[in-house]
Amino acid sequence: MAVPDKTENAKEHGSTDQAPTTETANIKKDSVKHDGIPATGVRVPFAQPVSEAVPSPQSALTPDQKSKYDDLLSKVSSWEEIPDSAKDKNSTSPIKDAERMWLSRECLLRYLRASKWQIAKAADRILDTLTWRRDYGFETNLTPEKISVESETGKQMILGFDNNARPWFFSAFFRVIYPFIDVDTREKIKFNENMRDHVPPQQLIKDVGGDVDFEYDHAAYWPELNKIADQRRHEQVDRWKRGGKKVGELESYLKGGQETGLAELEKVDGAGTAQGDKTDAEAATGEASKSDGAKGADDA
């Protein structure tokens, strides 16, 4: 069992960090106890985290990290064309809106941290990933119909949210690849622990210590998961467009955790400093903007 960080996008996993509503919408009315904990009949994923789930606040960047982030943002923002295939990187075509939207602030920071804050290495990795996504047909070929067969047995599934409002899932596969995972990522994956310490019991199945009597029914689960994913994806695309189609947009804005996007924040401070980008020194002297515990922001 693994408790992962945020999933990359809603189309893949139906991920969300939007303002929580009641989780009982997924449960038959006659199968809910008086305390609101699901009893029986749960066959579809929970659409929202419990109201008590609180996203972890972002860590402030040091002046050096902020400078490197700005350099990386400037570099990827300048990309007008990218390779269509890793086999022939000389064959390029214009970068698409979906690809620019994927280049969120948190995405860039993930690659910087994974590259030990080496700007050129981070940029190369990002470009390689974008090329791979094109090569693999990530936006066009990975349809629910094609993926459905992999989920028919319920061997890997998303059900609810952890205490930080992040989707969590089951997968035996993680035990195999765990030794090869980057040490920073490994710290976010939990095995053989008391899962009630990480996931609210009302969104945790009984098999691992929760209160949810879940029965995997692919015919019910799969359409509902994709319905949630499609809705979230549509909402995020709409926010990105309303925010000015910015590369480096805040995931907290895209996922509905805050109403203000990057463009508005840049207008407010007049210097292009997005919320969460204040340095540790500024935070220590009380000059940093108050953290809103931005939903959807990730310190991977």
Image (tube, rainbow, N blue to C red):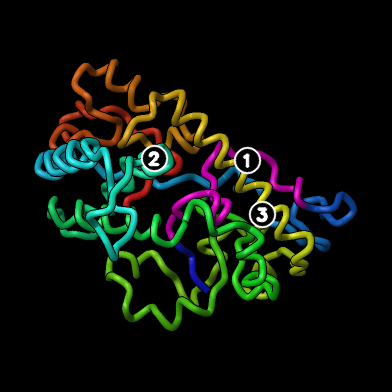
User: Mark 2 near mark 3, Cβ–Cβ under 8 Å?
Assistant: no
Residue 166 on image: x %, y %: 50, 53
Q: Relative to residue 121, is residue 143 drawn left or right? A: right
Q: Which amino acid lies under the numbered mark 1 shown in the image of this protein?
A: Gln
- Say the numbered circle drawn on residue 127: none
Q: Give the residue displayed 78% in from the left and 59% down from the top.
A: 220
Can residue 239 be seen by looking at this rendering? yes
Tag nearer the camera, 2 or 1: 2
Q: Which amino acid lies under the numbered mark 2 shown in the image of this protein?
A: Lys
Against 141, residue 207 (above or below) is below
**Quadrant containing the C terminus in the rendered view:** bottom left
Q: Give the residue displayed 46% in from the left and 57% down from the top.
A: 137
Residue 216 on image: x %, y %: 74, 69
Q: Residues within 10 Å of mark 2 (few under 14, many from 20)?
A: few
The answer to whether residue 258 is magenta is no
Residue 24 on image: x %, y %: 75, 48
- Which stretch is magenta? 5-26
Q: Quadrant of residue 283?
A: top left
Name the secondary structure under disc 3.
helix
Of pointers 2 and 3, the one earlier in the residue sequence: 2
Name the secondary structure under disc 1.
helix
Against 246, residue 39 (above or below) is below
Work out how far the residue at label 2 is from the one at label 3, CA to CA, in angstroms: 26 Å
The answer to whether residue 20 is magenta is yes
Q: Which amino acid lies under the numbered mark 3 shown in the image of this protein?
A: Leu
